[in-house]
Amino acid sequence: MSLQEIDPFPWFLHKDVPLLINGQRVEMNIRAAEWTKRWRPFLSNLLELQRLCGRRMLVGVAGTPGSGKSFFTEQLAWMATKNILPKVNLVSLPMDGFHFPESVLAERFLQLEDGRQLRMSQCKGSPDTFDVPLLREHLLRLKQTPQKMTWPGYDRVRHKAVPQAISIHESVNLAMVEGNYLFLDRPPYAGISDIFDLRIYVEAPPASVVTNLMNRHMEGGKTVGMAKDWVKHVDLPNARLVEMTKAKAEVFIQRDRDGAISAVVWPNNPGSSEPNSDDV
């Protein structure tokens, strides 16, 4: 069984492990109970599905802004480099690299729920600020497993996409693509969720999401007031839209207020685990 292939007590448990996510450093610290009850069964199921796929497997990871999607996929990518997933070559790919260039965003406008009009450069991260046809093109090419291709990254420190930042070799057999709107079922996003072999939705408590967003914006150079305004008028309306897409997911990763995984739920599979605050 694949569960037996996942280390029951890897060396990094209870240790601060640095990860670099979109140009920003974060710490990963996984406790033994979280690993045993959440991570290990999830990784076992993921390994089983990857093998059954018989080709490069594409996994879409969606969730609201600040829910921890990027953190989750980078955790998986890091674990793969440590051979936690035997014979899996995994890459983490951000949707944020498909933001339109600043020159385009500065020329286009978006109307907010409160009636205000903002330049797209002032509400970057909303659905209309992405080059969706280019994203679709990359996803379809990714699934074809070319000998080599590139993927754009995103730098949250400089607030810009980085073309061709990530090289993807044909040996990659598990590609994790994370982004807010991957499951959105309206033009121009319609049909993108169908490209994935597995769809995962990441959830976190609302208070944690707001805190994460505030910290992210301030670390990126915004004042407290600017960060609050952005969260209220851009991030939260986007979050409500993303919440409407969660029915597309086949797996739910639920985080607690400390960022630990409190439950992994597979609604249509026996490998589901239910939340229990005593477990983590």
Image (cartoon, rainbow, N blue to C red):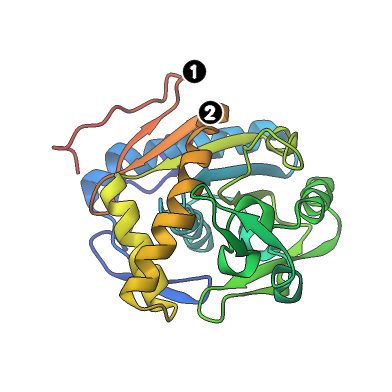
Label ID, residue 238: none
| Residue 140 relative to residue 76: left or right | right
Check the image and report above or below for 217 versus 9: below
Dot 2: few (<14), some (14–19), or many (≥20) neighbours within 10 Å?
Answer: some
Mark closer to the chain start, 1 or 2: 2
**In screen coordinates, is 64 left or right of 119?**
left
Q: Which residue is mark 1?
A: 268
Write down the quadrant of residue 160 in the picture.
bottom right
Residue 265, percent from left and from top:
40, 29
* Residue at x-position 60% and y-position 45%: 181
Instruction: Name the foreground residue: 13 vs 245.
Output: 245
Query: In the image as oriented, which residue stretches furthest toward the left?
Result: 278
Q: Which numbered disc covers residue 250?
A: 2
Q: Quadrant of residue 248?
A: top right
The answer to whether 120 appears left or right of 82 in the picture is: right
- Badges 1 and 2: C-beta atoms under 8 Å apart? yes
Q: Is residue 55 visible?
A: yes
